[in-house]
Image (cartoon, rainbow, N blue to C red):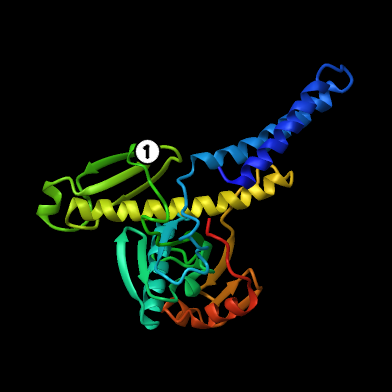
Amino acid sequence: MTDYLKQEIDRLDQKIAAVKKSLADRELAPLAEEELAKLQAQKQVLLAAEQTPQINQEDSIDSTTRSGNVIIEIRPGTGGEEAKIWAADLEDMYTRFANSQGLAVVKLDQGIIKIKGKQTATLFQFEAGVHRVQRIPETEAHGRLHTSTATVAVLPEISEKEVVIHPGDLTIQFTHASSQGGQNVQKVSTAVRITHKPTGIITSCQTQRFQEQNRKIALDLLRSKLYQRELQKIAAQKSAARAIIGRGMRAEKIRTYNFPQNRVTDHRIAKSWKALDKIIAGDLEPVVSTLTRQLPPASPSA
């Protein structure tokens, strides 16, 4: 536990003890019970930090200033089958943009890619959140406009020194891969699913031919998610200490892609680009450069 956390918990314990004394007063008891519930909720937020794997403070830096590789996870949101197609379109967009910047892209699993390069974190720091698309799906028989979403998480690639994962905290399952790869992949249990018991975070990988390769990728992804979770928790703890209870990290709608109008709108800066066809083809540079000028460095993605 950090000195900061210990001081805040000690302070809350003193307040809780004082409030408990007021419970004996019939007139003050209702207010005391309400105040006690608030203080205990704040304390629980702070105590939750003890369950998070330890970050090596000497090696770790915020993901937005890190100059190394990033892992981008894209998941379908609302919209059914069209949302799945939209998530795949976003993955293609990021892959093309990365390639245009001379960055290497490695597909880790379904909807998960790693982008390797010195300035990768800077280029992709503002992509985390909900991406909304408005278009007429190819399967739409009556020409109606549909709205679908996909969520994007941008995670720094974390070394084993930066986040220590204890083997006893893991449940590792091996199953038959359902992805392409031929009969040899199907005959053996190559797919790996890892559950981190203290946090409930689950990662998996099945794209590689060998079990150990999939295991390493799943562990790398878990390490990045735990790092991100810790940074978010630190922010929540500071808010809790200022009497803000229950503040959560929520994914926000950051951008809308309107195909009929060939327009992309970023809601954080209220700016639109009439070049959706070019942007979806990988020409994200105008969007990235504008966001870099107008927004402060991004906090860890949700």
In the depicted structure, whether residue 5 falls above or below residue 143: above
In the depicted structure, whether residue 262 falls above or below residue 107: below
- Left or right, 218 with respect to 177, comes to right
Circle 1 — which element? helix
Q: Quadrant of residue 8?
A: top right
Tell me which residue sits at (33%, 71%) in the image: 105
Q: Quadrant of residue 193?
A: top left
The picture places residue 195, in percent across and down from the top left corner, at 36, 41
- Left or right, 120 with respect to 110, comes to right
Q: Quadrant of the N terminus?
A: top right
Q: Is residue 83 visible?
A: yes
Instruction: Count all numbered tags in the image, as a single digit.
Output: 1
The residue beneath circle 1 is 169
Alpha-carbon neighbours of circle 1 within 10 Å: few (<14), some, or many (≥20)? few
Q: Is residue 78 visible?
A: no
- Left or right, 87 with respect to 110, comes to right
The picture places residue 141, in percent across and down from the top left corner, at 42, 63
Label 1 sits on what residue type? Asp
Q: Along the line of sight, which residue is nearer the eye, 141 or 262?
A: 262
The picture places residue 9, in percent across and down from the top left corner, at 66, 38
Tell me which residue sits at (48%, 75%) in the image: 123
Tell me which residue sits at (17%, 54%) in the image: 210
Tell me which residue sits at (45%, 76%) in the image: 119
In the depicted structure, whether residue 16 falls above or below residue 240: above
Furthest residue toward right: 27
Q: Along the line of sight, which residue is nearer the eye, 71 or 273?
A: 71
In the depicted structure, whether residue 100 falls above or below residue 81: below
Q: Along the line of sight, which residue is nearer the eye, 157 or 86?
A: 157
